Image (cartoon, rainbow, N blue to C red):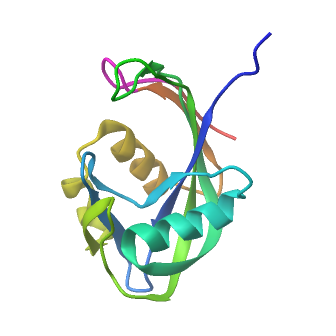
Amino acid sequence: MAWPVHIVAVGGLVESDEGKILLVQTMRGGWVFPGGQVESGENLTDALVREIKEESGIDVTVSSLVGVYSNTCVYKGIDGITDIPTKVILDFTCKPTGGELTTSDETTDSRWVDKDEVLNLITAPAIRTRYQAYLDYNGKTAYMEYVTRPEFIVNLDRTV
């Protein structure tokens, strides 16, 4: 039997003391909160700190686990051959500790956005759903299973 393959990713909901949320604009995904794939041998929080710094220029401390998400959609990658496997995504709240807003080879813009204005910028259904889980966070971690293709469908939504 072949070992299962998953992509593990992390997302950072970085909120300033003024109640603003850090967003980055990606080349292909529009506005999102920063994050990305955990590299081999890297722990989750180190990966998140690295991804946020790389994408936005902002240094953070990681606080609370807000949500765990399984994107069980398997689809062909950009090359049309490689299967992109199930993704397991963990979203954490973070506090900024320094740095200056910048962009990267993955982002075209980065900015602080009023918490109640974020959903006006985010268009991807999965990212909107995960941000709403952050807004609804009451100390219990959200768990969702969804697919993003051919359309976004939430198959399981609960807290743990």
| Residue 21 covered by magenta stretch | no
Magenta-drawn segment: 148-155
Which of 41/137 is in front? Answer: 41
Main secondary structure found in the magenta portion: loop
> Going 50% across and 64% down the picture, which residue do you hit?
51
| Residue 31 figure quarter | bottom left
**In this image, 66 relative to 79: left or right?**
right
> Going 63% across and 52% down the picture, which residue do you hit?
39
| Residue 77 figure quarter | top left
Which of 128/88 is in front? Answer: 88
Outermost residue on the top side: it is: 1
Could you tell me residue 140's position as x and y percent? 65, 51
Q: Does residue 35 appear in the picture of this structure?
A: yes
- As displayed, is residue 125 above or below residue 85? below
> Going 67% across and 57% down the picture, which residue do you hit?
44
- As displayed, is residue 55 above or below residue 58? above
Q: Quadrant of the N terminus?
A: top right
